[in-house]
């Protein structure tokens, strides 16, 4: 197997406020703003195009968010999916797919080509019991369970043609893909693409580019792995943060990578979570808005 290229990107820090667990960076192509969450704060943040930051405190642990066609923000809290007014921060419960299950919370999520909000859960039991799930939330508020037996559902991203879904389990450290019907949301059988070693970085949040590659944050090892559709790491971006959590593509041409990170204070590492950015050559796959 050929050796992956090691790249040290010219990354810049774009957020001055420290984060506990930065996650779910989402580019707003209408405003040039970057949205993200801080899971443990808990809070939703809006990094405006002019560099100003709006912060919306949340009433429960906050896993991810998605932009809506109406201009609202769909926010996945431990207490369910809510719709947030971006002017006032007011929350309205939309649905609660996880129904308050013990030792569980909503985690990574993204709107798919089918116009549904796909949201996974994290097993919060110690030790973990594989109670993690993946849900598909419809624009009318109904939902269905798609996967179970997970520990930490993560890394949701789709290919440019909408016909492949990528999904990882951070705790079990594997990446899988499925054939995907962008009209119905139906999945084919799972294909196990890769099992990660600790040295490769535990697979966290992810995004896809227009050339078909999958970009996976190697949390706890300071890496961003660019992975081929068949599961081979072809490029390793060594980052100036130790705990990258999720990338997203932004900028007018979708060639700017924004990456959130988490707070790490262990051993010789003493670092707050933040957001960094750098430019890449291949544009990212646009993420649809939730049609509500």
Image: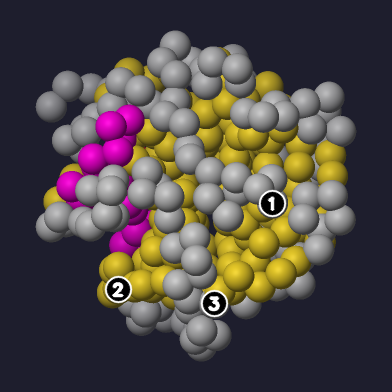
Q: Which mark is residue 72?
A: 1
Q: Quadrant of residue 42?
A: bottom right
Circle 2 sits in a helix, a strand or a loop, which is it? Answer: strand
- Disc assigned to residue 96: 3
Observer-nearest of 1 and 82: 82
Residue 93's place in the image compared with 182, above or below, is: below
| SS category of the residue bearing label 3 | loop
Do callouts 1 and 2 mark residues in contact (Cβ within 8 Å)? no
Check residue 148 in the rendering and tell me which mark sits there, or answer none.
Answer: 2
Viewer-nearest of discs 3 and 1:
1
For residue 22, the mark is none
Percent coordinates x, y for residue 263 in the rendering: 67, 51
Q: Position of residue 86 (x, y in %)?
A: 78, 50
**What residue is shown at x 77% (from left), y 55% (from top)?**
85
- Crowding at dot 1, Cα within 10 Å, few <14 / some 14-19 / many 20+, comes out as some
- The secondary element bearing badge 1 is classed as loop
Apparent side of residue 131 relative to residue 92 in the rendered image (left or right):
left
**Is 8 inside the magenta-drawn segment?**
no
Residue 273 visible to an observer of this rendering: no
């Amino acid at each position: 197997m050929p050796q992956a290229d090691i790249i040290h990107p010219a990354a810049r820090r774009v957020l001055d406020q420290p984060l506990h667990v930065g996650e779910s960076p989402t580019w707003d192509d209408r405003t040039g703003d970057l949205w993200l969450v801080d899971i443990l704060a808990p809070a939703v943040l809006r990094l405006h195009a002019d560099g100003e930051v709006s912060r919306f405190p949340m009433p429960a642990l906050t896993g991810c968010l998605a932009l809506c066609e109406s201009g609202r923000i769909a926010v996945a809290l431990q207490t369910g999916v809510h719709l947030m007014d971006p002017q006032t921060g007011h929350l309205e419960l939309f649905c609660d797919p996880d129904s308050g299950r013990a030792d569980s919370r909503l985690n990574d999520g993204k709107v798919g080509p089918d116009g549904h909000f796909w949201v996974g859960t994290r097993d919060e039991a110690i030790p973990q019991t594989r109670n993690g799930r993946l849900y598909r939330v419809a624009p009318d508020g109904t939902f269905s369970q798609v996967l179970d037996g997970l520990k930490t559902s993560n890394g949701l991203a789709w290919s440019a043609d909408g016909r492949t879904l990528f999904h990882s389990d951070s705790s079990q450290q594997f990446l899988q893909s499925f054939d995907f019907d962008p009209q119905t949301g139906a999945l084919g059988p799972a294909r196990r693409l890769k099992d990660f070693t600790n040295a490769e970085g535990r697979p966290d949040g992810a995004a896809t580019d227009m050339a078909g590659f999958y970009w996976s944050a190697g949390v706890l090892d300071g890496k961003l792995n660019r992975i081929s559709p068949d599961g081979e790491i072809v490029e390793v971006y060594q980052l100036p943060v130790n705990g990258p959590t999720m990338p997203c593509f932004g900028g007018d041409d979708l060639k700017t990578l924004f990456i959130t990170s988490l707070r790490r204070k262990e051993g010789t590492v003493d670092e707050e979570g933040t957001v960094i950015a750098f430019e890449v050559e291949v544009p990212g796959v646009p993420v649809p808005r939730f049609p509500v």
